[in-house]
Image (cartoon, rainbow, N blue to C red):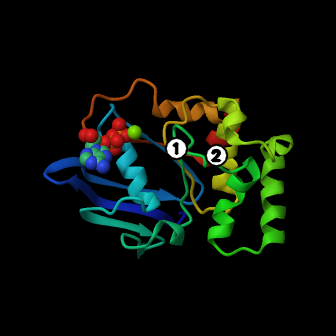
Amino acid sequence: MAPTMLELDRLEKRFGNSVAMADVSFSINKGEFIAVMGPSGCGKTTTLRMIAGLDKPTAGEIRLWGRRLNEDEPWERAAPLVWQNYALFPFLSVRKNVEFGLKQRGVPTASRKAKADEWLERLGITELADRAVDQLSGGQRQRVALARALVIEPEMLLLDEPLSAPCRRNSCVCIANSKSPSSTSPTINRKPLRWLIES
Ligand SMILES: Nc1ncnc2c1ncn2[C@@H]1O[C@H](COP(=O)(O)OP(=O)(O)O)[C@@H](O)[C@H]1O
Ligand SMILES: [Mg+2]
């Protein structure tokens, strides 16, 4: 059996007295793709933010390969989050947006540029490298956001409602946004990563 990669163990997040999500437990094996489903406000984004390290859990534990992650800073985890609205830096060019995570990790200029170019090419946006991101279409912005996340070669990739997918490969992630169960906490739909790529 594949080793468990990421585990959420009775995770809970409160903002003051209000409970954003509670008692969420699931585990993901290497190579798996899962969709977190549920109605608006049930805690999907909060769950992803905690995995990415942008929010700290109030209770419970997040473990990566068995090691507690709760206190690690976002840049210490290879878990970038691609936002629904892409959250690109509007004052930076496409290439600078893609290079950002590498710069934060202290990668030298030349290899930063080479890696960014590689991912721009893989996502078919090489010709946009020097454009300002506010001159791009929605689909092009989403590719930049994906390149920015993938360039650090993350162990996992978190996508928050990738609804306006620019290509068929991403569209199957939309099950996260389709008719969701009427549960008040996030529920999980599990598929192997191969299913995501081949759909
Ligand atoms: N920073 C915050 N402060 C207070 N409440 C928040 C904050 N972020 C989210 N919440 C609340 O937590 C709940 C879950 O929100 P969220 O995770 O964004 O839901 P979803 O992504 O499933 O729509 C909602 O009730 C929301 O209002
Ligand atoms: Mg959300």
Type of the residue with mark 1: Trp
> Which is nearer the N-term, disc 1 or disc 2?
1
Circle 1 Cα neighbour tier, 10 Å, few/some/many (<14 / 14–19 / ≥20): some
Specify whether tag 2 is near ligand 2 (CB below 8 Å): no
Residue at the extreme top of the image, as rendered: 179
Looking at the image, is 170 positioned above or below residue 24? above
Task: Please provide percent x and percent y for residue 139.
Answer: 68, 31
Residue 29, position as x, y percentages in the image: 51, 59
Horizontal side of 17 relative to 20 (left or right) equals left
Instruction: Decide which of 133, 112 is in the foreground and name it.
Output: 133
Considering every residue shown, the one lying at the far front of the view is: 91
What amino acid does circle 2 point to?
Ala
Please give the residue where the numbered disc 2 appears in the rendered image.
Answer: 145
Residue 144 image point, x, y percent: 69, 44
- Which residue bears the numbered disc 1? 83
Residue drawn 83% across and 55% down? Answer: 117
**Residue shown at 50% from the left, 31% from the top:** 175
| Quarter of the rendered structure image containing ligand 2 | top left
